[in-house]
Image (spheres, grey):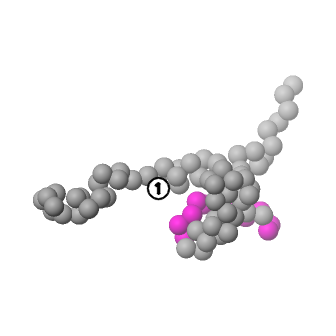
Amino acid sequence: MSKPEAILSDFLTKQELATELGREMRTLDRWDTLGIGPPRTRVGRNVLYRRASVQNWLAAQEHDARRTGAMAARPNGKA
């Protein structure tokens, strides 16, 4: 019989997420205050991030640099 999966196995702590993103925990706090960070869950005083939600948030942050450059800002695309 296999061991049951831990209920929080799909979640990252704030420290774990900060490490994976190469950011400080204070940055995650600031993103949360500004409403621009990944969704989070509180369990008591602990802040947790569901791995799938963070991956979705990261995907939503993608943009095409070719379309956001100075040339894209001009209606005719000419300098």
The kind of secondary structure the magenta stretch mainly shows is: loop
Within 10 Å of disc 1 (Cα), the crowding (few <14, some 14-19, many 20+) is few
Residue drawn at point x = 87 percent, y = 25 percent: 1
In the picture of the structure, the residue carrying the numbered disc 1 is 61
Residue 15 location, x and y as percent? Answer: 74, 58
Q: Quadrant of residue 39?
A: bottom right
| Residue at the (44%, 52%) spot, across then down | 62
Q: Is residue 11 toward the left or the right of residue 72 in the image?
A: right
Q: Is residue 1 left or right of residue 28?
A: right
Q: Which residues are magenta?
A: 35-45
Q: Residue at 80% of width from left, 67% of height from top?
A: 44
x and y percentages locating residue 56 in the rendered image? 53, 50
Q: Position of residue 17 (x, y in %)?
A: 68, 54
Left or right of residue 8, residue 79 in this image: left
SS type, badge 1: loop
Q: Say if the magenta span includes residue 37.
A: yes
